[in-house]
Amino acid sequence: MKLDFTGRVAIVTGAGGGLGRAHALALAARGARVLVNDLGGTTNGQGGSPSAAQAVVDEIIAAGGQAIANGASVTDPVAVAAMVAQAMAAWGRIDILVNNAGILRDKSFAKMPLDDFRLVIDVHLMGAVHCTQAVWPIMQAQQYGRIVMTTSSSGLYGNFGQANYGAAKMALVGLMQTLSIEGAKSGIRVNCLAPTAATRMTEGLMPPEVLAALQPEAVVPAMLWLTSSDAPTRAIACAGAGTFEAAHITLTKGLHLGLAHDTPEQLAAAWAQVSDRSGEQVPASGAAQGSNEVTQALAARR
């Protein structure tokens, strides 16, 4: 089964270089019409130029595809609304949104200025919120949509010096979890992609042979699957160097201890059993936690 995007319209943010560029080129090569968004700033979020997005558009057009450029900052909801209107005016629909735009302001938490924390949250999390909310009613009306949030192993599992980035990236998982539920009745599927790729944001951090294996193009197959017509929903796909994994947020079976004066001590003594992963589940929604807790509580009373 070939993943074909003929007739589809995609918006890819942060697509002027690196991973976003690879995403835009791949979607266009498979038939999608692509709005290439990029502020054209530095990796730490400074400056801006439309040339990066236009260069990718030129590549797509030269290869026989259809694309338009946009230089909006995803932190500006007015500019994002205009970007979505631009795509609608050109092509009349929006099927795919790849929230890829991001910046880095790395520093250990003790030394991190709050402004650097806020800006990273603003770009990664609020940028995705602005773009997703702008396309949401369009996707609801057409009863079709595919949205990808770019999360990260730094959010899923942590990484020294990236408290701001990790917090933003894990927040995108929470956003995806709820939007996948809310979008289901409208044919909107929402997923997360955790890429490992060598881009401007990773230069100087890895040896050359590792960087060679981590070309952005090796992540693209996961994005294509998550934005295809047969895509899953509520998945966290991880990809790098041609290897693909799925991450899950799970809930252990747990242990009912009740509420007594020594319950804290009981919990301390039983923590290994509480955290035992045998029989763990991937809940269908947040309600599963409460359901598990109440079920065990009621069973203990019988």
Image: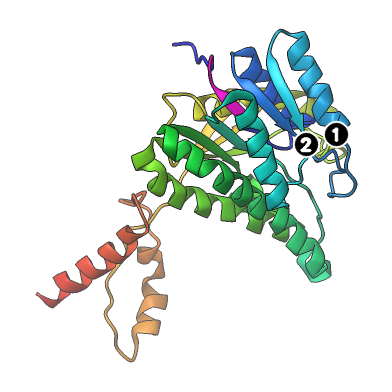
Is residue 23 placed above or below 106 in the rendered structure?
above
Is residue 69 placed above or below 45 in the rendered structure?
above
Instruction: Work out which quarter of the rendered image holds the C terminus and state it.
Output: bottom left
Q: In this view, does 141 lie to the left or right of 122?
A: left
Q: Which residue is drawn at 84% across and 33% down?
A: 207
At numbered mark 2, what does the secondary structure look like: helix, strand or loop? Answer: loop
Q: Which residue is drawn at 44% across and 11% down?
A: 1
Where is residue 209 shown, x and y percent of the image? 80, 25
Q: Mark number for residue 50?
A: 1
Question: Mark 2, residues whose alpha carbon is within 10 Å: few (<14), some, or many (≥20)?
Answer: many
Q: Name the residue under label 2.
A: 38
Is residue 97 placed above or below 291 in the rendered structure?
above
Q: Earlier in the sequence, mark 1 or mark 2?
A: 2
Q: In this view, does 252 lie to the left or right of 166?
A: left
Q: Residue at x 75, y 63 (%)?
A: 117
As drawn, which residue projects farthest toward the front? 89
Question: Mark 1, residues whose alpha carbon is within 10 Å: few (<14), some, or many (≥20)?
Answer: some
The residues bearing labels 1 and 2 have C-alpha atoms spaced at a distance of 7 Å
**Prevailing secondary structure class for the magenta stretch in the rendered image:** loop
Q: Which amino acid does label 1 sit on?
A: Pro
Is 211 within the magenta? no
**Could you say which is closer to the camera, residue 115 or residue 300?**
115
